[in-house]
Image (cartoon, grey):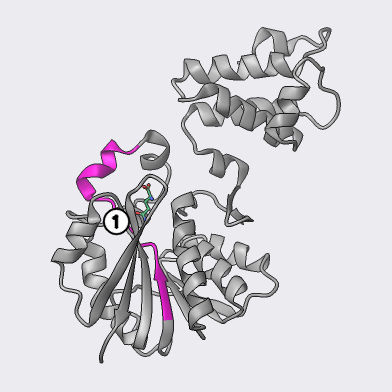
Amino acid sequence: MPHAALSSTQEALTLEDYFHVACQHLKKHAIENPANEAYTILSHLLNKDIAFIISRFKETIHDGFSKDSFWEILNRRSQNEPMAYIFGEREFFGKNFSVGPGVLIPRPETEHLLEWVMEDHVQKPFTHGIDLCTGSGIIGLCLGEELSIPFECVDTSDEALQWTRKNLEQRVNFKGDIHKMDILTDLPGKLGKVDLITMNPPYIPSADIHHLSNDVKDFEPHLALDGGVSGLEFLDMALKEIQSIAQIGCHLYLELGFGQKEILSSINLNSWKLEGWRDDLAGIPRIAKLTFLSE
Ligand code: GLN
């Protein structure tokens, strides 16, 4: 139900009024960091940055602000729906990606994977890439554009691939394609062999899924999160299959999670050699780089 102050047509409401109503509503529904969330909602509705919102706090709102949208966003967020789904987009690597139900929301730590690939490309240019478990396409579409090389984006989920296709439409300079494939059964022979493979596989241990925040576990696809008992069960099975699309010397860059450096060193890497790790900003070993040694 709309807040009484906001229902009144007599009163001129300031940004501060809307801010307080949003904070109260979010707090009532136990949403964490209500003030940050309230700023983000106002910033989205007014299409202005947060500094603008704060600097105009005492001003009344005139054009370009819909109370209905304000309440729709507030009510959806109060049910824990991720902001990226409500807004239909999330920024990643300086670009906007469309996202919604059925696809994983881009996380900032994935940017470390792109940075590492781009640094290596300067030393020894890659010629053709494949992005496995592509989801919204953030890794494959960004790297295809940044490196100016063809990139194939692969996923098994039809729901996720709808978002990949939508994001591909925005990438005018992208050379490459989108492929619906199951990595565990469909890879050999269909894509050829490349010198660069990237992958953000599902890596959360199954038993940890119910500890994730409600935003994640109730809304994001478990197919993109659940990596089996150890978290690396899917990867363990996939590494052998991925060899069929790797040229000798091909580099494979993987995003993994907390505590998985030890687990990766305990699984059979087949013909892959582990080159090293990069930490994320929290100091967690996040990106692993492997090289394919032999057929
Ligand atoms: N980084 C995601 C999270 O922590 C997990 C992504 C994945 O499993 N690939 O929620």
Q: Does 198 appear in magenta?
A: yes
Residue 15 x/y as whole percent: 74, 19
Crowd class of label 1 (few under 14; some 14 to 19; many from 20; radius 10 Å)? many
Is residue 208 rendered to the left or right of residue 87? left
User: Which quarter of the picture shows residue 270?
Assistant: bottom left
User: Which quarter of the picture shows residue 156?
Assistant: bottom left
* Magenta-highlighted residues: 196-212
Q: Is residue 22 above or below residue 213?
A: above
Residue 185 x/y as whole percent: 29, 78
The residue under the point 40% across, 41% down is: 216
Q: Nearer the viewer, residue 148 or 62?
A: 148
Q: Is residue 290 above or below residue 190?
A: above
Regarding residue 107, the answer to whether it shows in the image is no
Question: Mark 1: which amino acid?
Answer: Tyr
Q: Which residue is mark 1?
A: 203
Beta carbon of the mark 1 residue lies under 8 A of ligand 1: yes
Residue 127 x/y as whole percent: 51, 86
Q: Nearer the viewer, residue 201 or 8?
A: 201
Is residue 42 rendered to the left or right of residue 76? right
Regarding residue 58, the answer to whether it shows in the image is yes
Q: Nearer the viewer, residue 124 or 141?
A: 124
Q: Where does the N terminus fall, quadrant-wise? A: top right
Residue 145 x/y as whole percent: 62, 72
Per the image, label 1 sits on a secondary structure element best described as loop
The residue under the point 49% across, 17% down is: 27
Q: Where does the C terminus fall, quadrant-wise? A: bottom left
